[in-house]
Amino acid sequence: GNSVTQMEGPVTLSEEAFLTINCTYTATGYPSLFWYVQYPGEGLQLLLKATKADDKGSNKGFEATYRKETTSFHLEKGSVQVSDSAVYFCALREGGSYIPTFGRGTSLIVHP
Amino acid sequence: EAGVAQSPRYKIIEKRQSVAFWCNPISGHATLYWYQQILGQGPKLLIQFQNNGVVDDSQLPKDRFSAERLKGVDSTLKIQPAKLEDSAVYLCASRGGAEGAFFGQGTRLTVV
């Protein structure tokens, strides 16, 4: 079956530090890949997505590249802000089912 | 554009009581999902609707959980009777096309 594995948190950084949150996946076909963000007390919001190999999704300074050879979709940001503190979920969706499968989430804490 | 609306935001009930959650998806979105998010875990799909028909309810504990989507718009999720392990955030999401799903703020259920 499909699965998503994320690095365990929390990830604690100082403001303006470089961020990487690792995500690897297992899928039977050719999934679309997503990163969602969940701010405290809110629902999930789509942060970025990539639909095929070598695509790069980007939004709000965050980037992730769909790497089919390593089955990875790592999230990166060059300079984090306190307002980026949230839980980040990696997810995949196979074209046929349209049912997203989520990782466990990685909490990011950014200190001033 | 209005987002996915859910109510109530919070609910505390005693075990063996009943509870119902309501979701109003984004207008025009045919696909609606209910997820259960236990603290520290990623969201787990409970049921997926396409218009008013059920596409996947394989992970819905049908002895106590039920969901319906009359007229293919609003949806309700019911738990009867509730157990302590049902304490979680229940997220509703909708999707209208090939993009990622849009999530509501969720209903935080505490069973005591």
Image: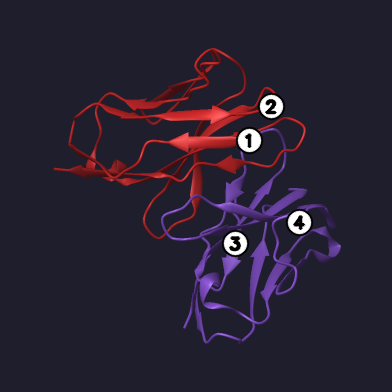
Chain colours: A red, B purple
| Residue type for callout 3 | Ala
Q: Quadrant of the N terminus of chain A?
A: top right
Frontmost of labels 1 and 3 is 1
Both labels 1 and 3 in a single chain: no
Q: Residue at x 59, y 53 (%)?
A: B44
Secondary-structure class at tag 3: strand
What is the spatial separation of the Cα atoms under label 1 and label 4, in whole angstroms? 17 Å
Chain of the residue displaying label 1: A
Q: Regarding mark 2 in the picture, which secondary structure is present there?
A: loop
Q: Which chain hosts label 4? A: B
- Secondary element at tag 1: loop
Amino acid at circle 1: Asn
> Is mark 2 in CB contact (under 8 Å) with mark 4?
no
Residue under label 2, please give it: A28
Q: Which residue is mark 4?
A: B57
Q: Which mark is residue A110?
A: none
**Residue A51 at what x, y percent from top left?**
62, 23
Q: Residue A52's x, y, as percent?
A: 62, 18
Q: Same chain for marks 4 and 3?
A: yes
Question: Which amino acid, mark 2?
Answer: Thr
- Whether tag 2 and tag 1 are in contact, CB under 8 A, the answer is yes
Q: Please check whether the numbered discs 2 and 4 fall on a single chain.
A: no
The disc, 4 or 3, on the residue closer to the chain's N-terminal end is 3
Disc 4 packing (10 Å; few <14; some 14–19; many ≥20): some
Q: Nearer the viewer, residue B77 or B102?
A: B77
Labelled disc at residue B5: 3
> Nearer the viewer's eye, disc 2 or disc 3?
2
Residue found 54% across the figure and 33% down from its top: A34
